Image: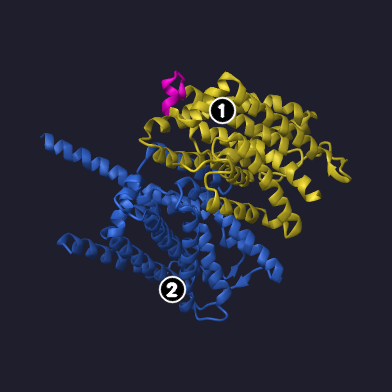
Amino acid sequence: MKTQDWKNLGWSAALLVVAALLPLTNDGYLISLGVSIAMYTVLATSWALFSGPTHYISLATAAFFGIGTYVMGSGIEHLPYWVLLPIAGLIGGVIAALVGLATLRLSGVYFVIFTLGLAEMTRQAVTWYQNQTGHKGTYVLTELTDPDIYWQLLGLAALVFLLGWAIGRSKLGFALRIIGDDEDVARHVGINTALSKIALFVVSGATAAIVGAMIAPRYIYIEPATAFTPMLSFQVVIMALLGGTGRLWGPLVGVIPFTLLWEAISSSFPNQTTLLLGLSFLAIVYLLPGGFVGLYDRLRGRAKKRSAMA
Amino acid sequence: MDILITGLILGGTYALIALGLNLQYGVSRIMNLANGEMLVIGAFAAFTLFTVGQVSPLLTIFLVAPLAYVLNWLIYRIMLRPLVKRAKNRGMLEVDAILTTFGLSFVMVGLMIWAFGGDYFSYSYLARPITVFGDNYGLNRVVAFVCAAILCAALFLWLNVSRAGMAIRAVAVSPENARLVGIDVPKLSARAFALGGAVTAVGGAVISTFLTLDASTGVMFTMKALIIVIMGGVGDVRGTILAALVLGVGETFVASVIDPGLTLVAAYALFILILLFRPQGFFGRKPT
């Protein structure tokens, strides 16, 4: 590792410690906002690990999240909480691998379409299964409080960032960047494109499932309509794109302002959320392609040019 | 038999919607995820005119089609054309188009909820039974099917016989080479996109005679239309119609034999089979 890496690591650790101090404020509203931000940070960052380099837009976050929630919901009476988290990750990962095997061998459009309906399809299947067995929802009763959930999510965020950093430096990360630039070239230089894509999709699917399992105790009562909200997938995509997927820290920069903004919007215009979500999508495509990261890079590029001229 | 006919009738209306999407994706290369909303707009128009002025939905079509054509033409010119120009390759355009049309679909849903509220809407048009092969079906369903069949046939003929249809097919096959034989590709892309939108909106007006819809059901139809287009093959009219009928029958089968809540699961099962065994569509050839 170079000195720059150590420096970055130091800064990140310091930020993490500062973030971990939030529950000490004892302010319920702040902590619940913190839980949302931590949750979206994990989801958006792990989404960008896959979709950033490959440009494959995954809309399956809500499906994996819901699966994780249900693993926790149906297992909490039989197994301890800490065992269920990895199980949720494992199941999420296996399903992601199956979805990836079916769609990622083909062009990107198939993948987008498939993930678009995945949450809704899983919801239908779970609802049907529950109707067959005759119960409507499940209770998740634990001793966990909001600060506990917040710390767990922060820990998971740190893990995802470390993993993302490691992948970025590995052969796999390099392969993915080539696939994103030109898939044909990637295939010709001997990269197993399907396998690389599936590997990363599994990472993001498993992470989303673990997040769902961690959030489950907060819901207390779980039913298909709350666990599989298609809106979640879109929010994650917007946040990640707003920040920019070119850098590891990009999604984080998008998550914080968007979560705050969304909080304000949904409390003052509860009926116009869909409209405003649509407008933010359009704003990002037309005004901020590349997100904040893209803007930052352009500004820096311009500054460099200017200093070179002088 | 009952399932087969109900399924075919449903599939017929699906075919109309999917043809609209296929024109937009096959020719203009825009994966339009706001397609389902265009359908709901058509349905809303039929509903409003029927409840306010007792106008038959079959007449509304003639009003909906030109309006939807103009609306979609404007959408293409104002919103999508800049993206086509900006994109360096087809992959980039696809990502941009998906995000934009997503945004557009949310905006449309939001506007419709704002204007009409989020309630379900339906009206009673030709709701009397008719006997076909010894079983009873709603007359409105049968009329909708006939209507869809006529429109599909007309579109198919127009694409295959007329000069403009041939130009459109040429762009679908290869936009680069179509330019070389003197086809104005940007102009034709805009027209195909507009036409696709109009076809879908007409499909919405037709489907509203027998289905209950609300402002946010559009995405379900988008999903189904996408699955049909992929099953049938991009830019393939025959394939699209066949795929729509297969999906209609499959869905009706699952809904009546297992559970009505599983229609999307049924569509997905078909989708997976196609992806695994014939990703190039029913009539498609393997790329060499």
State whether residue B213 is above or below residue A89: above
Residue B225 percent coordinates (x, y) = 60, 42
Where on the picture, by quarter, is residue B44?
A: top right
Query: Could you say which is closer to the camera, residue B41 or residue B280?
Result: B280
Q: Which chain is blue?
A: A
State whether residue B217 is above or below residue A60: above
The residue beneath circle 2 is A148
Tell whether B224 sits left or right of A292: right
| The colour assigned to chain B within the rendered structure | yellow
Q: Chain of mark 2?
A: A
Where on the picture, by quarter, is residue A195?
A: bottom left
Please tell me whether mark 1 sits on a helix, a strand or a loop.
Answer: helix
Residue A271 percent coordinates (x, y) = 59, 47
Task: Assign the magenta stretch its main secondary structure.
Answer: helix
State whether residue B233 is above or below residue B277: above
Q: Which residues are magenta?
A: B176-185
Query: Could you say which is closer to the camera, residue A39 or residue B57?
Result: B57
User: Residue at coordinates 63% horizontally, 31% vertically from top-left?
Assistant: B199
Residue under disc 1 on the same chain as residue under disc 2 = no
- Identified by mark 1, the residue type is Ala
- Identified by mark 2, the residue type is Asp
